[in-house]
Image (tube, helix red, strand yellow):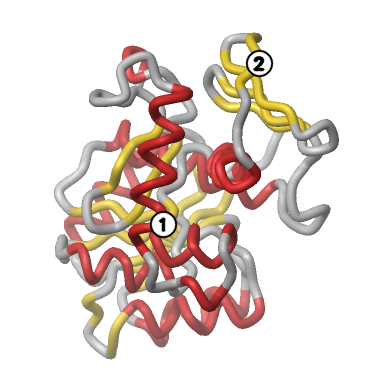
């Protein structure tokens, strides 16, 4: 029998901890709990979990401090669960290394979907930066042949468009910030040039989406970045 995946819930609200304990436990997770940064740090050191659900407003500090400490030594997936919904705070958390960000209140179905994406993403870490052949939704990217197909049909992309789609496919289902995409595709000197992304995402949508004005797959996260859906919106 497969052991339950341990999830550390870092949350000072006892009612929210009970909700997550009950909901995640019913879906086969082993839920561990911490109400403060100190408890969370000790829990991670003693028994590293497979995933961390992290509130930002904690009694003894900001959850971002724990996130930054974790990212110095670990790729444990971290999903932020916070009442802070401002775009700037989401961007800060994602740029600091969070795998995703959910604003309270949220449904357990959405949380479970984000957990699945985060765990899939980290399961590919430690090998090559990206597999030679990747797929998500209708898209297939072959790095070796520098080819892209959509629903089995070839599509011609420029080198920049190819690299932008490749990184979105590699991290399908996960929001990537403007800075993350700019750093990956254009390099660290371009992290402030968000107009690069707007122009190339518009071109990608014209080439890849059936209705570029209402994209099904290349989704904007307003003020934050972009996400490539890993499942059809009709089946989310």
Q: Residue at x 46, y 45 (%)?
A: 174
Q: Position of residue 165 (x, y in %)?
A: 56, 39
Q: Position of residue 71 (x, y in %)?
A: 57, 76
Residue identified by numbered label 1:
196
Work out which quarter of the rendered image holds the C terminus and state it.
top left
Residue 140 in view here:
yes
Instruction: Kindly indicate the quadrant of the structure image that contains residue 53.
Output: bottom left
Answer above or below: position of 72 versus 183: below
Q: Residue at x 64, y 72 (%)?
A: 74
Q: Label 1, label 2: how many angstroms apart (C-alpha)?
A: 25 Å
Q: Position of residue 204 (x, y in %)?
A: 45, 34
Answer above or below: position of 195 versus 163: below
Q: Residue at x 28, y 88 (%)?
A: 61
Work out which quarter of the rendered image holds the N terminus and state it.
top right
Do tag 1 and tag 2 residues touch (Cβ < 8 Å)?
no
Q: Position of residue 226 (x, y in %)?
A: 38, 47
- Left or right of 217? Residue 72 is right
Q: Nearer the viewer, residue 154 or 8?
A: 154
Residue identified by numbered label 2:
154
Q: Nearer the viewer, residue 110 or 150?
A: 150
Q: Residue at x 34, y 77 (%)?
A: 63
Residue 26 in view here:
no
Instruction: Kindly indicate the quadrant of the structure image that contains residue 157.
Output: top right
Answer above or below: position of 59 versus 179: below
- For disc 1, the neighbor class at 10 Å (few under 14, some 14 to 19, many from 20) is some
| Badge 1 or badge 2: first in the primary sequence | 2
- Left or right of 218? Residue 14 is left
- For disc 2, the neighbor class at 10 Å (few under 14, some 14 to 19, many from 20) is few
SS for tag 1? helix
Q: Residue furthest top?
A: 152
Q: Which mark is residue 28?
A: none
- Left or right of 140? Residue 37 is left
């Amino acid at each position: 029998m497969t052991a339950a995946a341990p999830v550390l819930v870092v949350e000072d609200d006892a009612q929210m901890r009970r909700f997550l304990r009950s909901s995640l436990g019913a879906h086969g997770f082993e839920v561990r709990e911490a109400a403060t940064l100190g408890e969370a740090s000790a829990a991670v050191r003693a028994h590293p979990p497979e995933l961390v659900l992290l509130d930002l407003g904690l009694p003894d500090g900001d959850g971002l401090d724990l996130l930054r400490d974790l990212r110095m030594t670990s790729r444990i997936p971290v999903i932020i669960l916070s009442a802070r919904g401002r775009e700037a705070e989401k961007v800060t958390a994602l740029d600091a290394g969070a795998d995703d960000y959910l604003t309270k209140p949220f449904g357990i179905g959405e949380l479970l979907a984000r957990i699945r994406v985060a765990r899939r993403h980290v399961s590919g870490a430690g090998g090559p930066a990206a597999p030679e052949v990747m797929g998500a939704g209708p898209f297939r990217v072959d790095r070796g042949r520098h080819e892209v197909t959509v629903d089995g049909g070839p599509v011609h992309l420029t080198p920049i468009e190819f690299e932008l789609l490749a990184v979105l496919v590699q991290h399908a289902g996960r929001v990537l910030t403007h800075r993350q995409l700019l750093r990956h595709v254009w390099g660290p000197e371009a992290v402030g040039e968000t107009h690069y992304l707007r122009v190339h995402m518009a071109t990608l949508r014209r080439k890849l989406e059936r209705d570029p004005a209402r994209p099904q797959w290349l989704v904007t996260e307003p003020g934050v970045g972009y996400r490539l859906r890993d499942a059809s919106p009709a089946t989310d």
